Amino acid sequence: MAYNLAPLQNLIDQFEKMQGIGHKTAQRMAFYVLGLSKEEAEAFANAITEAHEKIKQCRICCDLADDELCPICKSDGRDRSVICVVEDPRDVAAIERTHEYKGTYHVLHGAISPMDNIGPDQIRIKELLARLGDGTVEEVIMATNPTVEGEATAMYISKLLKPMGITVSRLAYGVPVGADLEYADEVTLSRAIEGRSLI
Amino acid sequence: MAYNLAPLQNLIDQFEKMQGIGHKTAQRMAFYVLGLSKEEAEAFANAITEAHEKIKQCRICCDLADDELCPICKSDGRDRSVICVVEDPRDVAAIERTHEYKGTYHVLHGAISPMDNIGPDQIRIKELLARLGDGTVEEVIMATNPTVEGEATAMYISKLLKPMGITVSRLAYGVPVGADLEYADEVTLSRAIEGRSLI
């Protein structure tokens, strides 16, 4: 139901624009805002404008940054001879959570998808190539999503990089740890068999 | 995972404070904001501060209003001899959606709940009593929630109103339309039997 109160309806509409937020949830969120103190509501509104103003893309890896460089590109402790290529800044966060990877990243901001009119020029491939000119980088790990688009992007980039003498690798496919084999799909299972290792 | 970028983390935290919003959803919302244009982000932030500034409580019925009176109390087409008492502004919206009720409302903003330290003085009962002095109101329909707190509140208010010669009624209990009898709980079913009507 549309509320008769324009400011309330407007706020509900704003929340509802977000992907995955239905009308009921948007309404609940708007009532949450009405229940805040004046200071809290201002802090909330400021958080939106500030994040939007201050968060930019790192000049080197295109990850999100609040400065010209992101914290990883600024850091002295990272191995600059390896670049892990991902589709999205959230993927960087996911890999960082493993605490296993010490190299740098490159965020493509998408994957090649002719169906959605996204070609190689619409994602940050040029910026990746620009990083490979000086010979520091020895390996590029393709960590695009295990989807048709992600695969196509990984193949496209690997074909560009191989003539440059750079090792290109791909994340391993297999059954997720903790999952039940019974519920694994056939493609994942056959990839897991292909990629089996000696124990 | 905490992001190293303070403005982003702050925005995620703001979304995560909302009831029912987990970390993953809050993160997705923050990335949605980053993907907006500058104008859209400002409109979003303004919607929050504006709704918060402009939405007040109606001087008569305590429902939400963007003026001194809410649209229903302002309207000439409503029957002022009936007041429907609800716990929350959302309940007004729910009843309005039926297009059946033509009286006015009174929003308590809560229910009596000794467990949460909410007594009769913490909800808008005083304001309801103030509306009953001049003899216009003939019936008060209690439409508090069918919970222990809602029941207790309805009983408390009806005891106050009966000596004033005002008819006090209660929403009917019964099986929800479209529901399966098999899954109705015993209390609802026994209330439905008690309240059965001739056909």
Image (tube, coloured by chain):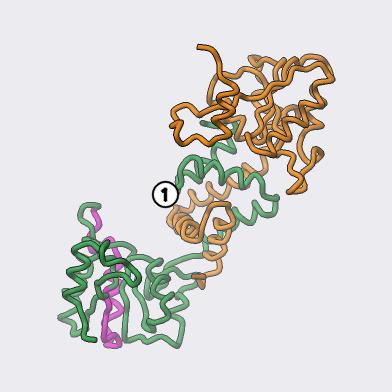
Chain colours: A orange, B green
Looking at the picture, tell me which residue is in the foreground, A114 or B52: A114
- Kindly identify the amino acid type of the residue bearing the numbered disc 1: Gln
Residue B197 drawn at (x, y percent)? 21, 82
Q: Which residues are magenta?
A: B117-142
Q: How many marks?
A: 1
Instruction: Please say whether residue B119 is one of the residues in the magenta stretch.
Output: yes
* Residue B128, above or below A95: below
Where residue B133 sits, quadrant-wise, is: bottom left
Residue B65 drawn at (x, y percent)? 46, 70
Residue B59 drawn at (x, y percent)? 40, 73
Instruction: Say if residue B86 shows up in the picture.
Output: yes
Instruction: Please say whether residue B189 is one of the residues in the magenta stretch.
Output: no
- To which residue does mark 1 refer? B19
Tag 1 secondary structure: loop
Looking at the picture, tell me which residue is in the foreground, B122 or A161: A161
Looking at the picture, tell me which residue is in the foreground, A42 or A135: A135
Q: Residue sitting at 47 percent across and 77 percent down?
A: B71
Q: Chain of mark 1?
A: B
Where residue A91 sits, quadrant-wise, is: top right
